Amino acid sequence: MPMNAEPQIDAHANAGTFPGRVAVIIYDQIGAFTLGVALEVFGRALPDEGYPGYDVSIVSAEGRSVTAFGGMRISATAGMAELRQARLILIPAWRSNHERPPEKLLSELRRAAARGAILVSICDGAFVLAHAGLLDGRRATTHWADLADLKSHFPDIRAEDDVLYVDEGNIITSAGGASGIDACLHLVRRDFGTRVANAVARRMVIPPHRDGGQRQYVANPLPVHAGRTLSASMDWARSQLHKPISVAEFAREAAMSERTFMRRFQEEVGASPKSWIASERMRLAQEILESTETPLAEVGLAVGYTSPETFRSAFRRIVGLPPSTYRSRFRQL
């Protein structure tokens, strides 16, 4: 490699014991919550769980210490040059949808993307990536209240409504602040597997896995009919993943008509029953692959697939890797 060449990064490689550097961008009026998300997920190691944490740096977009929303002062721990070494760059919610970020920051983000760094936005951080031209022609999301602005100002972006995050390989955009947790855990899962990501989630006392395709919010957060929640029927479905589950069976378990069940499930979970079951099957398959040497055909049977080919195809489509590759990458010794 020439002396002045920048290192190329494999965004999907298993990070192993050195998951790489994470640079978190700060700026005046940053929300402390989104900064805390990055520090909590990436910066706190869990040695007993096989999670070394990442090497986290805080980089100021404006070259100085900043004042967060609410008055807290935050100092950078590294200069802008750190962005040229980082494997992952996280952009929290930008302070204004109508303000163009500093040109030096936009230039460094383009440079980072060109060498294969992973760029992750939380909430309105998507506008920073949009101003850099890195979302043109791609799927992306942001906070639901700002999607109209994103679509209006950047028509070349394929803006996604009602999703928690969008994974476009080395560029990931997430919705509101809490959705940033889901996106960050998604990255830990890509690097270390389901078991470690679940351990990080347990430490934070949050759900271990919410798919990117779930809705950003639900219109009716409280059940309309007391005593008729979906949690019991969902627990039942998780116990039946080894066999086919029809929507009609699922609805009967919830003591609802099929039509009412479909509507309630979409409202409360943010996904269709069919897609939720498929995700649950793959989550269980990941756990089996990580913790056992069970043959792939038997893993498929354990999660409801009688055909090994169908299981492999579904696993690759949902998880992003063939099951054999996933096992070799994340098998716990």
Image (tube, rainbow, N blue to C red):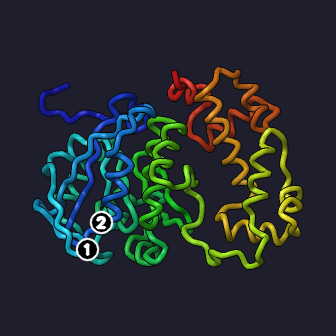
Q: Position of residue 271 (x, y in %)?
A: 67, 61
Rendered view: 199 above or below 124: above
Numbered disc 1: secondary structure: loop
What residue do we see at 25% from left, 57% from top? 25
Give coordinates of residue 115: x percent, y percent. 29, 40
Question: Number of numbered discs present?
Answer: 2
Separation of marks 1 and 2 at Cα, in angstroms? 7 Å
Residue 258 visible, this orientation? yes
Left/right placement of residue 262 relative to residue 16 reads right
Q: How many neighbours does mark 2 have within 10 angstroms: few (below 14), some (14-19), or many (20 or more)?
A: some
x and y percentages locating residue 247 in the rendered image: 84, 57
Between residue 56 and residue 232, name the one nearer to us: 232
Q: Quadrant of the N terminus?
A: top left
Task: Give the residue type that dot 2 points to.
Answer: Ala
Q: Earlier in the sequence, mark 1 or mark 2?
A: 2
Please tell me whether residue 151 is drawn above or below residue 11 in the rendered image.
Answer: below
In the displayed structure image, the side of residue 298 where residue 199 appears, left or right: left
Above or below, 47 relative to 75? above
Contact? badges 1 and 2 (CB < 8 Å):
yes
What label does residue 69 carry, if any? 1
Q: Quadrant of residue 11?
A: top left
Residue named by callout 2: 32
Residue at 21% from the left image edge and 65% from the top image edge: 27
